[in-house]
Amino acid sequence: MNTIQQNLLHIKSTLPEHVTLVAVSKTKPVPDLMEAYNAGQRIFGENKIQEMADKWEQMPKDIEWHMIGHVQTNKVKYMAPFVSLIHGVDSLKLLEEINKQAKKSNRIIDCLLQIYIAEEESKFGLDKEELSALLTSPILEEMKNIRIVGLMGMATFTDNQNQIKKEFTHLKTIFDGLNDTVGSRRDALQCISTPKTLSMGMSGDYQLAISCGSTMVRIGSSIFGGR
Ligand SMILES: *Cc1c(COP(=O)(O)O)cnc(C)c1O
């Protein structure tokens, strides 16, 4: 069996320079994360806020912590002091809470809007209409402590490469259209940056995701082993 360090270095060697690697360390113990840290990894992704906060306390402070799971509004306060990027934002209500908690911590928190692209009931995210509704909401203009920097999506869990490719391509099209959706309101909207991050691709499909335009991949089991 390969070590975490070997897995990590191998994956990094296959990624184009413009693609950021999030090492998904959910359920894994701190010594496993430290092995990746000692091999140079500084971005870790977790899907439970409490677990992420525990690891943040125990680990070096130059780590960027990404929340990749579904976020419950009442738990935002536990990560607001330190989280670097929240991938799974799927409502205005959640954005408002992130903005409120970020303000308390005197921070601006980067967020990705999660788009629903899979054919699976169990997955979260906004559809195209909900995305436009969110981006045109007047409430956004008052949000000074969040910054929407791009989109995130998860493809259907299937072996059908054509279907996954179709879903990733769909997300990329929405991503490319974001500037137009925001349009002339950009100047009024401090909280939306030029879209730069497209988070798509996991252990099983990240190469395909990159070929479809991903700029950030979230890889867990191929680095740390199965869960
Ligand atoms: C667990 C998880 C991943 C990583 O999955 P692997 O198949 O282990 O690479 C990526 N994204 C999200 C949202 C996850 O929950």
Image: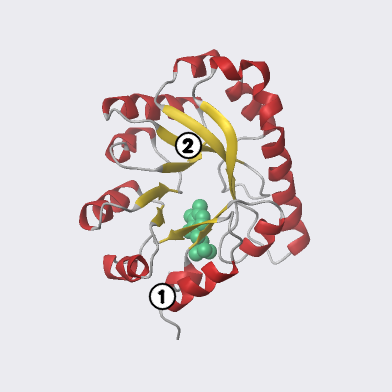
Q: Amino acid at mark 2?
A: Cys
For residue 193, above or below residue 208: above
Quick check: marks 1 and 2 in contact, CB under 8 Å? Answer: no
Query: Residue 22, how many percent across, how many down?
Result: 47, 57
State the residue at coordinates (45%, 15%): 142
Disc with the residue nearer the chain's start (1 vs 2): 1
Report the disc number at residue 150: none
Return the residue found at the far bottom: 1
Q: Is residue 207 left or right of residue 57?
A: right
Mark nearer the viewer, 1 or 2: 1
- Quarter of the picture holding the N terminus: bottom left
Query: Residue 143, how many percent across, how many down?
Result: 44, 20
Callout 2: CB less than 8 Å from ligand 1: no
Q: Is residue 64 left or right of residue 147?
A: left
State the residue at coordinates (39%, 43%): 84
Q: Determine the secondary structure under disc 2.
A: strand
Q: Is residue 91 left or right of residue 168?
A: left
Query: Residue 175, how many percent across, how many down?
Result: 67, 38
Query: Residue 11, how many percent across, how many down?
Result: 53, 70
- Quarter of the picture holding the C terminus: bottom left
Q: Amino acid at mark 1?
A: Gln
Return the residue found at the far left: 58
State the residue at coordinates (58%, 58%): 17
Where is mark 2, residue-wise?
111
Where is mark 1, residue-wise?
5
